[in-house]
Amino acid sequence: MKLKKNNINNIENEIEQIIKKYDKNNISTINKIPCINNEKIILIDTSDIFFCYIADDKTCVKLNNKVYITTNTLSEIEEKTGFFRTHRSYLVNLNKITEIYSWFNGTYKLIMNDHDKSEVPVSRAHVKEFKEEIQL
């Protein structure tokens, strides 16, 4: 049986997608993110992080009741931790979400389980993937 070139390309694409999904689920994660605190570098355990965001061109790491600055970019943190990107300026630890509600124009807001009950946006560009990720 001969396979047409289109069929081979489709099969290759499907295999690539499966491998990417497998790799994402089995990502090698680090346990610490270096952050700056009073001119010292402290190592924050990733399980203590609720979310990360960009503010004033700085990458912020939000813990329960503290915010630290890191020299890592959101993309670097995403690669290292597997946190979910909900917006171009936000990464979320999915284990720290308490509530989800519809916001406007097909977007969502997440209520985090931190001391401040912080709200994190989910942009329209990330809604579909977010719903798949949390099986909604």
Image (cartoon, grey):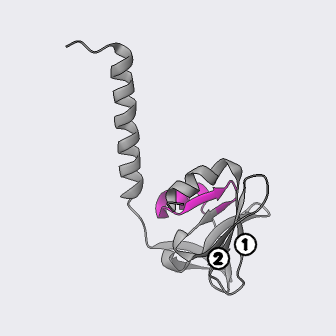
The CA span between labels 2 and 1 is: 6 Å
Q: Where is the C terminus found, in terms of image quarters?
A: bottom right
Along the line of sight, the residue nearer the viewer: 120 or 53: 120
Q: What's drawn in magenta, residue-wise? A: 72-90
Q: Are marks 2 and 1 in contact (CB under 8 Å)?
A: yes
Residue 113 lies in the magenta stretch: no
Q: Secondary structure at mark 1?
A: strand
Return the residue at label 1.
Answer: 119
Vertical order, 115 against 87 (above or below):
below
* Residue drawn at point x = 70 percent, y = 81 percent: 117
In the depicted structure, whether residue 9 falls above or below residue 97: above
In the rendered image, which residue does mark 2 sit on?
112
Please name the residue shown 70% across and 50% down the image.
Answer: 124
Residue type, numbered disc 1: Glu
Which residue is painted at 78% across and 52% down in the image? Answer: 105
Q: Residues within 10 Å of mark 1 (few under 14, many from 20)?
A: some
Out of 49 and 133, give the one closest to the viewer: 133
